[in-house]
Amino acid sequence: MNPARFHDSLRIEDLDLSPAEAKLRLSVPEAVAGPMAELRGRLVGPRCRFSSTVEVAYPLRPARPAETVPGAVAARVVIPEPCLWDPDSPFVYMGPVELWSAGQRLAEVSVVHPLRVVRLEATEIWVNGRRFPRREAPRKRVIAEDWLNLRREGYTVL
């Protein structure tokens, strides 16, 4: 199994996002994983560069029938009382996701996932139902050191 192929085909979908609970589905096509494969791992969080948090590990569990995807291997994660991502507090959940088949680990990837619903409009950005002004930084390229400075200056879009 090519880990890059697994990484490129792994999908993380927010099935339900609310302040009470987040339900996520992780899936990979059977054509990549194989029909008898399973996903294992965990997401750990919340983690935020600008906040101190207590991180908890949330294990991947088998997907329920309503959460499956035809032609894919799927798992789910439930996070009670999640910290949702926004530009002021960019919380993420991260961790290893492994592909297993016949008792052997075939591949592993590390994922980072923010819990958010984003809608872009002409002058505003809506994140999880909250409005933020849209302020664009006219840049073709950004190096790592630029991110924090742009954030401090109030830019929201590149």
Image (cartoon, rainbow, N blue to C red):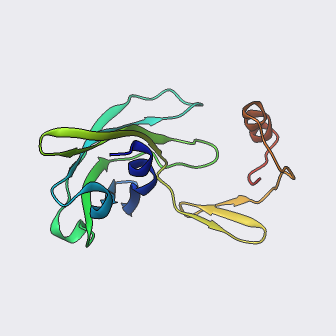
Residue 24, position in %: x, y?
34, 56
Of residues 34 and 51, the one nearer the viewer is 34
- Write down the quadrant of residue 43 in the picture: top left
Q: Is residue 27 above or below residue 52?
A: below
Q: Residue drawn at (40%, 60%), measured in percent from left and top?
A: 14
Q: Is residue 137 above or below residue 64?
A: above
- Write down the quadrant of residue 35 in the picture: bottom left
Of residues 70 and 36, the one nearer the viewer is 36
Name the residue at the left extreme.
Answer: 102
Residue 17 in view, yes or no: no
Q: How many marks?
A: 0
Residue 24 in view, yes or no: yes
Q: State left or right for residue 40 relative to residue 130.
A: left
Residue 33, position in %: x, y?
27, 55
Residue 1, position in %: x, y?
32, 46
Q: Is residue 156 above or below residue 44?
A: below
Name the residue at the right extreme.
Answer: 138
Q: State left or right for residue 139 relative to residue 102.
A: right
Of residues 144 and 99, the one nearer the viewer is 99
Q: Residue drawn at (32%, 41%), measured in percent from left and top?
A: 107
Q: Residue drawn at (24%, 60%), measured in percent from left and top?
A: 73
Q: State left or right for residue 50 relative to residue 8.
A: right
Residue 39, position in %: x, y?
24, 48
Q: Residue drawn at (12%, 45%), measured in percent from left and top?
A: 102
